[in-house]
Image (tube, rainbow, N blue to C red):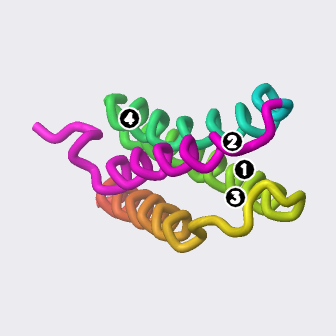
Amino acid sequence: MQTHKDLKVWQKSIEFVEYIYTITNDFPKEELYGLTSQMRRCAVSVPSNIAEGSARNHNKEFIQFLYVSLGSLSELETQLIIAVKIGYLSEFNEQEMHEIRKMLQGLILNIKRKFNE
């Protein structure tokens, strides 16, 4: 029986959480309850919603949770851009983020196709 831990997108998003925690360690201490906390919550939200959605009994619910994951990923991307603009980061791993987004979108389409069969 497959679980969320078997999904490549969940595995990749867990790795991205580790990345976000690492890069936010160097943010100013006054951001601990601001941008640092917000970015970490968004990052954690991506694999958490994948996991919660996959545990649901209905494909429609799973898709809803995957859309929440996409929303969190977009929010995180915005925060990373802000972190670069204000000088907390010189750059971020945009490629990894886009890969997770493509994987989420692909999973949604795959579930929708199976749901319509």
Could you tell me what secondary structure mostly forms the magenta stretch?
helix
Who comes first in sequence, dot 1 or dot 4?
4
Give the secondary structure at mark 4: helix
- View extreme (right): residue: 86
In the image shown, does 80 or 117 lie closer to the viewer? 80
User: How far from the left and from the top, in percent, is residue 69?
Assistant: 55, 46
CB of mark 4 within 8 Å of CB of mark 3? Answer: no
The amino acid on which the numbered mark 2 sits, given as a three-letter code, is Met
Residue carrying label 3: 77
Give the residues in magenta: 1-29
The image's mark for residue 39 is 2
The image's mark for residue 51 is 4
Please state, as top left, top right, bottom left or bottom right, where the N terminus lies in the image: top left
CB of mark 1 within 8 Å of CB of mark 4? Answer: no
Who comes first in sequence, dot 4 or dot 2?
2
In the image shown, does 45 or 32 lie closer to the viewer? 32
Q: Is residue 46 left or right of residue 52?
A: right
- View extreme (left): residue: 1
The amino acid on which the numbered mark 1 sits, given as a three-letter code, is Glu
> In the image, is residue 5 part of the stretch drawn in magenta?
yes
CB of mark 1 within 8 Å of CB of mark 3? Answer: yes
User: How far from the left and from the top, in percent, is residue 33?
Assistant: 79, 26
Residue carrying label 1: 75
Label 1 Cα neighbours within 10 Å, binned few <14 / some 14-19 / many ≥20: some
